[in-house]
Image (cartoon, rainbow, N blue to C red):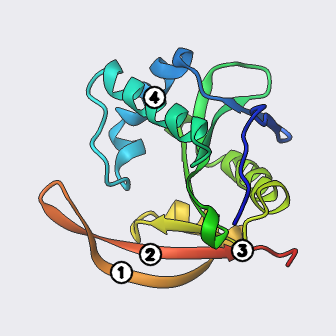
Amino acid sequence: MLTVNFIPFPTLYTEHLHLREMTNDDVEGLFAMRSNPINMQYISRHIAQTIDDAQVLIDRVKRLLANNEGITWAVCLKDSPQIIGTFGFWRIDAENHRTEIGYMLHQDHQGKGLMHEVMQTGLEYAFNVLKVHAVEASINPANIGSINLAERNGFIREGYFKDMYYFNGKYVDTCMYTLFNPHE
């Protein structure tokens, strides 16, 4: 069984970014991402309609963190406190030494290699600090950018699940990717 403890909160740094704890001050930036149809097009979650919808997500992130069941970072440019993305391990399966990854970057910052930086740093944390055996990613097969990011970071596609989720009146497929701890 993994022992998970996120106190103190682990702030992480990349060449161009810092990853910090998400706070209530991030609600407007999170709303800007979660209410953006382009950002949400491959995520089987409802688009945020109000600031309160974004606050509900922040509250969920805080609850998972407090219970050591998940961790999500606010992704910020190194010289700014403004949230431009999120990255985290939103479901930690301590018994089986696994976690599921989730990430989002505001469309204005996509295509610049920033999420690759975040992914590398986050995976180092997962394997070297959390000591997980495997990191999983559930990716919409139409999300070529996310698939490329996962594969560029060593994830292997292990399955294609047809009609995995029912969302907005239709069934949605998903691809399951896994990256195993390279230090084991």
- C-alpha gap between disc 3 and disc 4: 32 Å
51 relative to 144 in the view: left or right: left
- C-alpha gap between disc 2 and disc 1: 6 Å
Q: Residues within 10 Å of mark 2 (few under 14, many from 20)?
A: some
Above or below, 103 against 18 in this view is below
Q: Of 53 and 91, which appears nearest the observer?
A: 91
Q: Secondary structure at mark 2?
A: strand
Q: Are marks 1 and 4 in contact (CB under 8 Å)?
A: no
Q: Are marks 3 and 4 in contact (CB under 8 Å)?
A: no
Name the amino acid, label 3: Gly
Q: Which residue is mark 1?
A: 161
Which numbered disc flags the more N-terminal residue, 3 or 4?
4
Name the amino acid, label 1: Phe
Q: Which residue is mark 3?
A: 154
Q: Which residue is mark 2?
A: 175
Above or below, 25 against 151 in this view is above
- C-alpha gap between disc 1 and disc 4: 30 Å
